[in-house]
């Protein structure tokens, strides 16, 4: 719960000086920093050279009206995330509806009611802050397309069945590594390691959705369906091994510990969705495929192969990826044996 | 009907502190003659859109200060322009006269 709002940087666009003063003083009195523009062209210039948190935009203006400014902003990737509140007199309700349908954040009737002005502006700023935070969070864990899609479709907490490839990766014998070096060195190692793994996963259209200790879980083919998720997952695994090889060379040069990882991938139907609450949700997958991927990953150590995959993943691979058949494997607690394949690192 | 509705004006005055109301009155007194001039120019050029927009702004400002009668006159002109009718007769003169009275009243209402 936030008791006092945080001030924002606002642009007021109105050709009418009385309105500009009215809006500006009201908002400045509320702690916001305010700039003004007298017409649409001036507004766009200011928006492109400064970074505003919110725009209050008049509809009726000569030359370039508010509707045209709104349209221009929404089509510009650099400007479309700035929330825009339309200001209009009561008799312009048709234009207001058009603007909100087009993508305006909200609207305010003129003459503005100071209490409503304050409330609507603060609500819009708060929404923008949440969106910015969510975007930052998702950018760390997923590709830009996934982050954008999630923001566009919203964060409904319901789940759905999707066909996806699930990856688990773990550092081998991490506990002993932790005992051999001091804590800060271990954290440093983990941060470097995760940075490399994220690069490989996100670069191959995957989404990292869980981190636990030295282990991670990633999903390919969800939240946005993508053909070729089996191949993406395996290529990500190959790149992870490759990047780790380079990492180990550097570690050896600095006389530091080298690490090995195991990667397990399984493909099939999973239930994907957000779990948690509206305020803190993670995108996750559950289901048999997830359990199998986790089991396969555990098995990499015993099998002495860094990348193991199940049959459904294998069936989705192009010919240039070299694979060795390891045969059926019966995992504890599973009724059916699973055909395991080892992917040959480059 | 009073020239300036006291309730509307007082509410406006309380919206912000300091020199706010004086600044606002100045802007209104500076801008309104320009708007009326623009309406004359638009009338001569038969520019319905410019006439309508200026009448619209004048109406909006008049209502902000509680100058209700001035607002009604401006709205009438806005509606006429919307209907593509610029046969405004002596309405611009009446509007100008009314503005003169409102301006005088506002001068006396400064903080």
Image (cartoon, coloured by chain):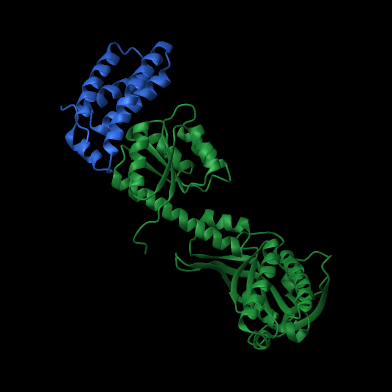
Chain colours: A green, B blue
Foreground residue, A227 or A336? A227
Q: What's the residue at 62%, 55% (across, down)?
A: A145
Q: Dividing the picture into quarters, in which one does residue A279 lie? A: bottom left
Q: Is residue A20 visible?
A: yes
Q: Residue A253: horizontal and vertical position, in percent?
A: 79, 76
Determine the residue positioned at 49% across, 36% down: A43
Choose top left, top right, bottom left or bottom right for residue A104. Answer: top left
Quarter the C terminus of chain A occupies: bottom right
- x and y, in percent, of residue A133 in the image: 50, 60
Residue A194 versus residue A298: which sits nearer the camera?
Answer: A194
Question: Can you name the residue that lies furthest to the left here?
Answer: B1
Quick check: B60 above or below A79?
A: above
Query: How far from the left and from the top, in percent, is residue B26?
Result: 30, 30
Q: Is residue B91 above or below residue A295?
A: above
Please tell me how many numbered marks the rendered image carries. Answer: 0
**Vertical relation: A229 (above or below) A72:** below
Q: Is residue A215 left or right of residue B12?
A: right
Spot occupied by residue A290 in the image (x, y as percentages of width and height): 62, 75
Q: Could one spot residue A74 in this view of the protein? A: no
Is B94 situated left or right of A134 in this image?
left
User: A77 left or right of A88?
Assistant: right
Where does the N terminus of chain A fall, quadrant-wise?
bottom left
Figure check: B76 above or below A19 = above
């Amino acid at each position: 719960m936030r008791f006092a709002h945080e001030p924002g940087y606002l642009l007021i666009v109105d050709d009418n000086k009385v309105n500009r003063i009215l809006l500006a003083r009201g908002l400045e009195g509320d702690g916001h920093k305010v700039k003004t523009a007298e017409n649409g062209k001036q507004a766009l210039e200011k928006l492109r050279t400064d970074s505003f948190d919110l725009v209050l935009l008049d509809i009726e203006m000569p030359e370039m009206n508010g509707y045209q400014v709104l349209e221009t902003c929404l089509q510009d990737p650099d400007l479309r995330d700035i929330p825009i509140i339309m200001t209009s007199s009561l008799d312009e309700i048709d234009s207001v509806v058009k603007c909100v349908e087009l993508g305006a954040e909200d609207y305010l009737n003129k003459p503005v009611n100071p209490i409503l002005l304050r409330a609507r502006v603060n609500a819009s700023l708060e929404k923008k802050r949440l969106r910015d935070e969510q975007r930052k969070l998702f950018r760390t864990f997923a590709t830009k397309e996934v982050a954008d899609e999630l923001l566009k479709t919203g964060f409904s907490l319901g789940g759905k069945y999707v066909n996806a490839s699930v990856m688990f990766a773990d550092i081998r014998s991490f506990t002993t590594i932790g005992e051999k070096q001091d804590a800060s060195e271990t954290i440093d190692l983990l941060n470097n390691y995760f940075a490399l793994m994220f690069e490989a996963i996100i670069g191959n259209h995957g989404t990292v959705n869980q981190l636990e200790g030295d282990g991670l879980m990633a999903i390919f083919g969800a939240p946005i369906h993508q053909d070729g998720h089996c191949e993406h997952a395996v290529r990500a695994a190959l790149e992870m091994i490759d990047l780790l090889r380079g990492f180990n060379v550097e570690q050896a040069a600095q006389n530091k510990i080298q690490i090995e990882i195991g990667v397990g991938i399984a493909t099939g139907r999973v239930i994907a969705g957000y779990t948690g609450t509206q305020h803190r949700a993670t995108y996750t997958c559950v289901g048999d495929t997830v359990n199998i991927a986790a089991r396969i990953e555990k098995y990499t150590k015993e099998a002495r192969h860094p990348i193991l995959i199940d049959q459904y993943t294998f069936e989705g691979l192009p010919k240039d990826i070299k694979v060795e058949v390891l045969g059926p494997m019966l995992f504890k607690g599973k009724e059916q044996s699973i055909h395991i394949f080892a992917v040959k690192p480059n | 009907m009073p020239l300036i509705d006291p309730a509307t004006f007082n509410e406006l005055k309380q919206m912000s502190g300091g020199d706010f109301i004086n600044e606002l009155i100045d802007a209104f007194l500076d801008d309104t003659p320009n708007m009326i001039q623009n309406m004359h120019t638009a009338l001569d050029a038969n520019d319905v859109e410019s006439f309508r927009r200026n009448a619209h702004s004048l109406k909006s400002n008049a209502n902000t200060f509680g100058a209700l009668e001035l607002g009604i006159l401006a709205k009438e002109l806005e509606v006429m322009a919307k209907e593509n009718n610029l046969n405004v007769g002596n309405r611009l003169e009446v509007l100008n006269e009314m503005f003169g009275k409102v301006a005088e009243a506002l001068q006396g209402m400064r903080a």
